[in-house]
Every structure is written in structure tokens, then in C-alpha cells.
Image: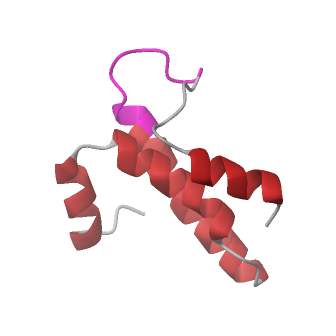
Amino acid sequence: MSQDMKEKLEKYRTAPFDARFPNQNQTRNCWQNYLDFHRCQKALTAKGTDVTPCDWYQRVFKSLCPTEIKISQHKHAFY
């Protein structure tokens, strides 16, 4: 993994602004980052490479998503 990506992950505090989701309701942003995380993991695992870059999506969706959604993600597979 590149040094630049490691630095970004270490400095991460909360989800950055995403121009695709300009509204106050961030439900779709939460959902999209959840899907991106699992797609990233699936793709990189299939290639046999390190899945550490996927941590960005996980941190963003954990930051944005309400606690109830995070708990239900482990009980039910949305993907």
C-alpha cells in the first residue's frame, strides 16, 4: 500500500464531503460506501492482493451510518 494512502487513513477523522450526496440526508452515502467496501474487499480478495485500501470505505460508512444499521449489517447480508 502506498505511503500516501497510509497517511490519509491515519489522519482520518470523519467522512469527507462527497459531491454525489450534497443533501443533509446521508443515507444513500452510507449505503454506497457500505457497498463500495464490500465490492472492494471482494475484488481485491479475488486478485489475491492486500485489502487494506478498502479500510477507507469501511471507516466512512461506519462514520456515516446510524448504529442500528451497523448492527443489522452483521445480522443480515445486504450484499
Residue 73, picture quadrant:
bottom left
| Relative side of 22 to 3, left or right | left
Position in image of residue 4 (x %, y %): 79, 51
Is residue 20 found inside the magenta-colored segment of the image? yes
> Quadrant where the N terminus lies?
bottom right
Residue 25, picture quadrant:
top left
* Residue 8 seen by the camera: yes
| Relative side of 23 to 73, left or right | right
Q: Residue furthest bottom?
A: 48
Please give the range of residues in magenta: 19-29
Residue at 41% x, 15% y is: 23
Check the image and report above or below for 38 versus 50. Answer: above
| Relative side of 39 to 22, left or right | right
Q: Residue furthest top?
A: 23
**Magenta highlight: main SS:** loop
Instruction: State the residue in front, 19 or 62.
Output: 62
Check the image and report above or below for 50 versus 73. Answer: below
Residue at 27% x, 56% y is: 70
